[in-house]
């Protein structure tokens, strides 16, 4: 019995019983989980997280105001992925997961031909609306969790006015 107590005391002192944090202590940005549903399209090249300080109104806004401008990627081969995105402090009106098919991005509205909205963070009080997220100075906004449904990928034109492809 004494050995069990010593083991518990040792593991507790070493932090062995505490969960690994999603947000790195040094992260200024946001982090959370993305749950994946549906069938991953065969032509999937990437899935990434994007954030907007103001909700984009045009395809130009959609490309030019995306943070980060050159996004990383989120592993999408399992049903759940942890993510973190470095961002400047501020209140972001739209945080979303973007699905990308193969093709070279040019950072112009023409990029919308390669991109689809996979899912977005929703307002906890009204899940039909996007939720805003505040990244505090010198810290991160955690628990920004949402779902990507590969069977319901939506074009940018469902959200903004586009005049290009």
Image (spheres, grey):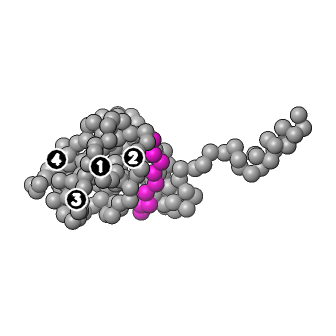
Q: Quadrant of residue 119?
A: top left
* Mark 1 or mark 4: whose residue is earlier in sequence: 1
Real-space Cα distance between discs 1 and 3?
10 Å
Magenta-drawn segment: 80-91
Q: Residue at x 20, y 48 (%)?
A: 156
**Disc assigned to residue 44:** 1
* Mark 1 or mark 3: whose residue is earlier in sequence: 1
Quadrant where the C terminus sits is bottom left
Badge 1 vs badge 4, beta-carbon distance below 8 Å: no
**Disc assigned to residue 157:** 4
Horizontal side, residue 138 vs residue 51: left or right: right
Which mark is nearer the camera, 2 or 4? 2
Q: Quadrant of residue 65?
A: bottom left
Q: In the rendering, at what x and y percent does residue 54 appear?
A: 29, 54
* Mark 2 or mark 4: whose residue is earlier in sequence: 2
Q: In the rendering, at what x and y percent does residue 114 appear?
A: 21, 54
Q: Secondary structure at mark 1?
A: loop
* Mark 4 or mark 3: whose residue is earlier in sequence: 3
Label 2: how many Cα within 10 Å (few below 14, some 14–19, many 20+): some
Badge 2 vs badge 1, beta-carbon distance below 8 Å: yes
**Disc assigned to residue 103:** 3
Which mark is nearer the camera, 1 or 4? 1
Q: Which residue is mark 2?
A: 76
């Amino acid at each position: 019995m004494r050995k069990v107590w010593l083991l518990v005391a040792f593991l507790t002192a070493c932090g062995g019983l505490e969960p690994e944090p999603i947000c790195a202590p040094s992260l200024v940005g946001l982090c959370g989980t993305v749950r994946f549903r549906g069938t991953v399209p065969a032509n999937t090249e990437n899935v990434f997280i994007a954030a907007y300080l103001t909700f984009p109104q045009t395809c130009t806004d959609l490309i030019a105001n995306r943070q980060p401008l050159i996004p990383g990627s989120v592993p999408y081969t399992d049903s759940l992925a942890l993510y973190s995105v470095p961002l400047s402090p501020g209140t972001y009106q739209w945080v979303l997961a973007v699905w990308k098919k193969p093709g070279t991005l040019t950072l112009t509205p023409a990029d919308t031909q390669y991109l689809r909205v996979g899912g977005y963070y929703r307002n906890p009080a009204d899940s039909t609306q996007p939720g805003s997220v505040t990244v505090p100075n010198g810290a991160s906004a955690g628990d920004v969790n949402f779902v990507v449904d590969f069977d319901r990928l939506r074009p940018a034109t469902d959200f903004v006015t586009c005049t290009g492809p």
